[in-house]
Amino acid sequence: MASIDIMKWSLRVLVVLTVVLMLTHLATLGILLLAVDVHLGVFYAMTRNKCDRRQLKHIPVTHRM
């Protein structure tokens, strides 16, 4: 299994876990995990698109979430 597939599925699992935590009384942990999800999502998009920091401003990560 390629590392990009591992990152894709771990990002999906973290997003589902974040949503579950946001709907329970552990919303504080969900908010903290949301910050981790955003950083991992940007890293995943950069790796998938094979781009560098100069191209980072053109990746619409927030629109896919």
Image (tube, rainbow, N blue to C red):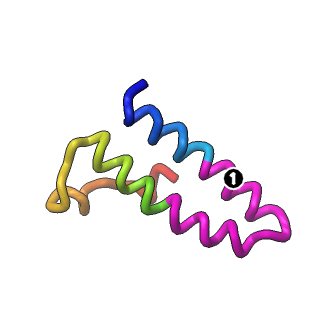
Residue at 19% x, 61% y: name it: 53
Q: Please tell me how crowded label 1 is: few (under 14), some (14-19), or many (20+) other residues with Cα within 10 Å.
A: some
Find out whether residue 60 is within the magenta segment.
no
Q: Residue furthest bottom?
A: 28
User: Which percent across, then down, holds residue 14?
Assistant: 60, 51
> Is residue 55 found left or right of 28 in the rendered image?
left
Find out whether residue 28 is within the magenta segment.
yes
Residue at 76% x, 55% y: name it: 20
Q: Residue furthest top?
A: 1
Please identify the dominant SS of the magenta region. Answer: helix
Residue at 44% x, 55% y: name it: 40
Q: Which residue is mark 1?
A: 17
Residue at 53% x, 37% y: name it: 9
* Amino acid at dot 1: Leu
> Is residue 58 found left or right of 5 in the rendered image?
left
Where 13 falls versus 42 (above or below)? above
The image quarter in which residue 49 lies: top left
User: Which percent across, then down, holds residue 28?
Assistant: 71, 75
The number of discs equals 1
Where 1 falls versus 65 (above or below)? above
> Is residue 30 found left or right of 12 in the rendered image?
right
Q: Residue furthest left?
A: 54
Q: Nearer the viewer, residue 59 or 5?
A: 5
> Is residue 63 found left or right of 32 in the rendered image?
left
Disc 1 secondary structure class: helix
The image quarter in which residue 24 lies: bottom right
User: Which percent across, then down, holds residue 58?
Assistant: 25, 57
The magenta segment is 14-37
In the rendered view of the protein, which quadrant contains the N terminus? top left
Q: Nearer the viewer, residue 61 or 24?
A: 24
User: Which percent across, then down, holds residue 36?
Assistant: 51, 63
